[in-house]
Amino acid sequence: MTEKCGVVGVALDGRDAARPLYYALYALQHRGQESAGIVTHDGFQQHSHVDRGLVGDVFDEGDLEGLTGSAGIGHVRYPTAGSLDTSCAQPFSVSFKSGSLGLSHNGNLVNADEIRDELAALGHAFTSDGDTEVIAHDLARNLLEEDLIRAVKRTMGRIHGSYALTISHDETVLGVRDPQGNRPLCIGKLEDGYILASESAAIDTLDGELVRDVRPGELVVLDADGGGFDSYQLVDEDNTAHCFFEHVYFARPDSVIDDTLVYEARRELGRKLWTESGVETDVVMPVPDSGRAFASGYAEAAGETTPDGEARPEDDDGVEFAEGLMKNRYVGRTFIMPTQDERERAVRLKLNPIKSTIEGKTVTVIDDSIVRGTTSTQLVQLLKDCGAEEVHVRIGAPPIVAPCYMGIDMATREELIAADKDTDEIREAIDADSLAYLSTDSVADVLEAERDDLCLGCVTGEYPYDIEDEESDRDVVRPELEGRTMHADD
Ligand code: SF4
């Protein structure tokens, strides 16, 4: 499962924005490792540097020096819509009649093809098959007829899906979150300006202060002199659709998203997991690093109550928390495993067990999700090979039963183990002694949200957007395109 993208935008008082953007992208690197880019504007012209690779590889000193100007936007990308080449790397930038435009997008539009067809019929030439270029062309077209705020509003009325955008229009930097706030975006104050970023960890990296989340349907416009920002609530929806997986898996634990510190949310989910399905074993251990906060919350709750919810006697410490698996941090995405046998051994390259914490013991192992089930199967086998007497698996989220259309690279329905197997069948398939997932109610409880204000599409199969051939869990319809006509300047 892979997060899509991270976006950032900065407006400063006189100082070049390139270096703060670069550091912010470093802080957001976990959200995308395929490509990175920065677009700045110096008052006269736009500068852009975008390439494939990690942030540290994409920019050198000379690149940063060439990105002059005190305002700009940046992007790290993992491709979800569009092909895997530099034409889809971002920020997307274009110069047109009413100025220069840069666009960074996190999310996925579900009606991009309709809009692309319409604009292509009007003569727009597209250089990529990504949905970001569709937004950029639509906005550029609207800017021929409207002021910036109205142009953004009009584009928002036409696109359907998830988006957190940072946009530069000449020296003006804007941030927009889709009307249901599916993807995160927050505002921060820096010593000499303001920043918009996917996660607050980027603001911390620049010694800034988190001001607040951008509200769903809100447009934030940073003052070009870094002195403040203006807010325009362009669209109001009854419900939000925050992606709950941001808190479970994607976001950095040290980020605050929609008012909740991710680390605390994960610990609380772990506590709930104990309350719902705790099992007394000799040790509880995380799958590093994703399961760590869940396991620490789970072990803490296990120290307070028994699995039946009774308070523990003073001399009973509950389940021991232990690190039983060591992660090899140097196995990257590019690791090549040509044969099935080698693929099956992959878990040994990524994780190595600490025998003394496992041998002869009953073990609970905690992770955040099971996607295809391959890793879980290998993990259970690994622990058993290492001498575990029993292996119980606990997952800090509900079973993933359906794909994500909002920009997460998850798996197809056919590949998802929970799409056609119930929990006991999955337990059997991964050969665990027991298996339990967290309930959706507990997820909503921990995130202090109504179920109707979360996106739970991948765990319920019902989505908060209008997606072709899929059920929706609320009353949503994709916008009718108004049928554009040729503009006088076309
Ligand atoms: S379907 Fe799942 S991963 Fe995708 S946005 Fe919704 S909650 Fe997040």
Image (spheres, helix red, strand yellow):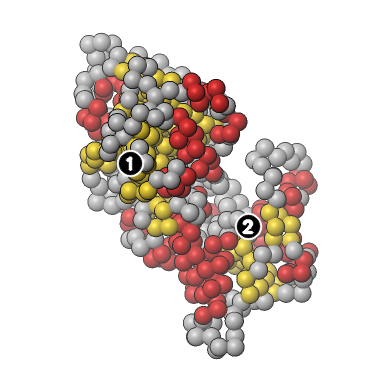
Q: Is residue 481 left or right of residue 253?
A: left
Residue 469 appearing in the image: no
Q: Is mark 1 within 8 Å of ligand 1?
A: no
Residue visible at 74% across and 61% down in the picture: 353
Q: Is residue 205 left or right of residue 191?
A: right
Q: Quadrant of residue 54?
A: top right
Q: CA distance from mark 2 to mark 1?
A: 33 Å
Residue visible at 52% across and 68% down in the picture: 297
Residue named by callout 2: 288
Residue 448 appearing in the image: yes
What is the number of callouts on the image? Answer: 2
**What SS does tag 1 mark?**
loop
Percent x, y for residue 109?
39, 36
- Earlier residue among tags 2 and 1: 1
Q: Quadrant of the C terminus?
A: top left
Residue visible at 65% across and 68% down in the picture: 322
Q: Is residue 180 left or right of residue 22?
A: left
Percent x, y for residue 186?
36, 45
